[in-house]
Image: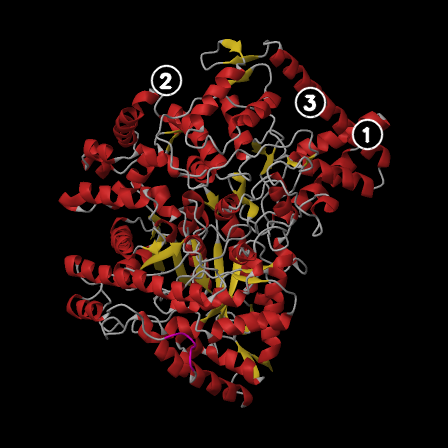
Amino acid sequence: MANLTQIKKRNGDIVDFSVDKIVNAINKAFINVTRSDNPGVANAIAEIVSRELELEAMGKDAYTPTVEHTQDLVEKHLMVAGFLDVAKHYIIYRYEHQKIRDDIKAENLEKLEENKLKIVKKDGKKESFSELKLKKSLEYVVKGYENVVDIDGLVNQMKLEAFDGMTTREITKALIMVTRSKIEEDTAYSYVASRILLRQLYEEVIGEHVDFANLGKEYRSTFVKNIKYGLEAEQLDTRMGEFDLEKLAAALVPERDNDFLYLGTQTLYDRYLVRDASRDGKCIELLQGFWMRIAMGLALLEGDKKNDKAIEFYHAMSEMRFVPSSPTLFHSGTRHPQLSSCYLNSVGDSLESIYKVYGDNAQLSKYAGGIGTNWTSVRASGALVRATGIKSNGIIPFLKIADSSTVAINRSGRRRGAACVYLENWHYDFEEFVELRKNTGDERRRTHDMNTAAWISDLFMQRVHENGDWTLFSPDEVPLLTESYGAEFTKNYKQYEEDAKAGKIKLHKTMKATELWKKMITMLFETGHPWITFKDPSNIRSPQDHAGIVRNSNLCTEITLNNNLEETAVCNLGSFNYAKHIKSGKYDTELVAKTIKTGMRMLDNVIDINYYPTKEAKVSNFKHRPVGLGVMGFHDALYMLNINFDTEEAVKFADESMEVISYHAILTSSELAREKGKYESYKGSKWDRGMLPQDTIKLLEESRGEAIEVSKGGKLDWAHVRQHIADFGMRNSNCMAVAPTATISNITGAIPCIEPIYKNIFVKSNMNGDFITINSYLVDDLKRLGLWDYEMIGQIKFHDGSIKNVPGIPVELKEKYKEVFEIDGKWLIRSAAYRGKWIDQSQSLNIYFNGTSGRELAEVYTYAWKMGLKTTYYLRSLGASQVEKSTVNAAEYGSTHKRGSNLNSSPEAPAVTIPTTSTIAPVAVANLEPRKPETVASKPIIAPEGAAKKVYNITRAPEATCDGCQ
């Protein structure tokens, strides 16, 4: 069950959730109607409401209900329980309080008009609210976006938000809220909201009296001062004091603060910037200091090159070409530098091992790691425990404990604990395992917060295809199955089947493979679990096939590393940003090479600097030194190159662009081996045997006895790479893994990972709140055609972000801006397969399915297997994802509605009104050079005079793919 801990007030503030407040409100309603309270009913209804909110939050990484929604539920359940008079009073109570708020707002507006409304300055002095000062502040903030942002509209909205006695900080906060509510009209509002927040950050870190005329100088001196302070306060690694701080400060580029969208700035401010507990949690670093602190932390062991390397790392990150994963961003340069993202471990068949893994996973979670655990070796329910002479209860009760442990740990105090458990689908308990995430049944045998994944052999998929039988075993009777794959697994499995028929194996069950496959697909569609991952391609294509077995993947299914009871596999992640490598309409391969070289060095450095929560993790990482360089912004690149996602041209770009990344990642690892030495377990690896990732497709084909339908070979001269490896070896056992980039995409403003855009307009939720996201590429194209106005916004919102049925938009744009559910999911798989031939680990590939047929869904996963994919991630179905519908007047926005001939001045065009906040904002913003707008300049979108005001609910995106890896 998800833990409901916070609630959002009407003014946007996030406060602690309190069931007592619900109880008190219900009791007050009873007292006013019956002259006495009714604590029994009040507590029962409060519990029901709380439970319903928890069910809404279930499985979500971040969920914060609003006060209004909570009150709606109270009304509903009072009426359901038959207390109609009390419910009526509760409704009237809410109405009267809303009227009071409206009256207060009217009173404040009257004071404003009479120049009597006072604001409280930082020094406690009061002065009249000045519309002129506010307008001048906004004119400064929107510098560079004057032709896009409606300053008068923001000022008028702010006047509605003003109240007597408002502080300047409240004014800043409200102005941010008002500005971010306009993001749907143009991305420029996002940059402006970011600048307002930056002003607040500058005053917090530099001081209240920032000299914006000399911001660069103050920015750099503050960086030096705060690094020294962080050392004195024992927050930073003592080695951070060994850098030439003046040289590093001189390298900072404060103007790059303007490159952040609001969501990026807010995310960094709330979760990533170093804070000082002794100063009420105030930040002690600015955004460019944040990047430099990480760069310094990753250059600690670079010897006399440390200053130059820190500057190199800084530029790669601050230009958003390459960004490390969240644990690295959290902890780099600090006293506890746990920089790794992912851990893979296995549980042995003993109580001691089970409880050891509980403890290990708690430590790994504590320091922000995401975990994948293999449970296949633990004996099944009904198997004999010889030491005690009793039968085992199997793995399910132990997984319940693991689930509770997962949610009990808050990773680095910044995000929920997260884990995934893996089980091979020949395990006798597998059928119950598949049902762990169901919302019905015995709660003692359900795990609502822990992810589950099936580890599936090629033999099983072949049996499904042949409509053959499949036998489930207890691992204590079939020990060779966990230690083999491919042809050897097939041989062992068939022998165990014969042994079972001969009565040599006691605990087994035979069923049709199609029956089990159907159950997996059904549960996957119903609960989103278990994820489908493939054992044989993960092992057959592994560079480390000489050093053990890949027994499972990680929390986000992109890591495929060996692990065992003595070794917990560790992977260090970071992502290359496609969006920053498209220059003048071309994929800039020279810049790609530069970025990859820097990124690989940063990731390799993590291994030596890292804090390891367990000895098994340290042993493994130093022995094999794997890293996982991934990608994000793939669809950004397609937009920039004018390539539609569901085309062979996109598949070709996925193939050829990843080849360039792979080439330089592998070559850089070999160059690092020449400089620093090979990884310890190199001898006997595929690298040592002259095999590269693209060569292993043939091995998989040979194992299956059928072709993998991806092109063989590439365009680059790989002979140089092969010779370099032959001469110097490799520094890292694995180089590439495509993680979800859930959070770092928010920071950089990129479309996550390798996916299509979710919707052209939607609400994105995370631990920091709800954020409107709009497809700026679409907005720019519509502006060029003169089609971007209030009516167009309304049309797109009526159609839930889709433009396919919006009249007036050219067909070519409708093809270009298809949303993810309008793209056949097989195109994502096809691109992943062609990209995957260059990758030595795997990819976090979500499956998007717009349908209800179990047969069709099974075909999608069968296609993924046939194309040679190693793993898949979440299943996103349309029904489960469309959780908030737009509420509009169908007569105005239905498919028969026609746009007026004058697109910029239709008198009937309805205004789009976002619910306002109940606080406001002042401002003066940083004196930074304006970011060059990437949006097409146009007149501000202003609501037509007298237009009817409507409120639109924008579809909320499915919860971020687990925030575990990035």
Would you say 82 lies left or right of 900 here? Answer: right
Tell me the number on the disc at residue 89. Answer: 1
The residue tagged 2 is 209
Q: Is residue 823 above or below residue 253?
A: below
Q: Is residue 774 above or below residue 172?
A: below
Spatial CA distance of label 2 from label 3 is 35 Å
Name the secondary structure under disc 1.
Answer: helix
Q: Amino acid at mark 1?
A: His
Q: Of the two numbered discs 3 and 1 on the same chain, state the one appearing first in sequence.
A: 1
Report if the CB atoms under discs 2 and 3 are less than 8 Å apart: no
Q: Is residue 316 above or below residue 346?
A: above
Name the secondary structure under disc 3.
Answer: helix
The residue tagged 3 is 101
Would you say 381 lies left or right of 458 here? Answer: right
Span colored in magenta: 707-711
Query: What percent of the width, then of the height, locates residue 500?
Result: 53, 86
**Most common SS among magenta residues:** loop
Is 586 covered by the magenta stretch?
no
* Residue 562 quadrant: bottom left
Within-10-Å neighbours for mark 1: few <14, some 14–19, many 20+:
some
Q: Is residue 370 above or below residue 216?
A: below
* Residue occupying image coordinates x 35% and y 79%: 699
Report if the CB atoms under discs 2 and 1 are less than 8 Å apart: no
| Nearest-to-viewer mark from 2 and 1 | 2
Spatial CA distance of label 3 from label 1 is 18 Å
Q: Nearer the viewer, residue 105 or 563?
A: 105
Q: Is residue 187 visible?
A: yes
Spatial CA distance of label 2 from label 1 is 51 Å
Q: Amino acid at mark 2?
A: His
Query: What percent of the width, then of the height, locates residue 72?
Result: 73, 38
Q: Of the two numbered discs 2 and 3 on the same chain, state the one appearing first in sequence.
A: 3
Is 709 covered by the magenta stretch?
yes
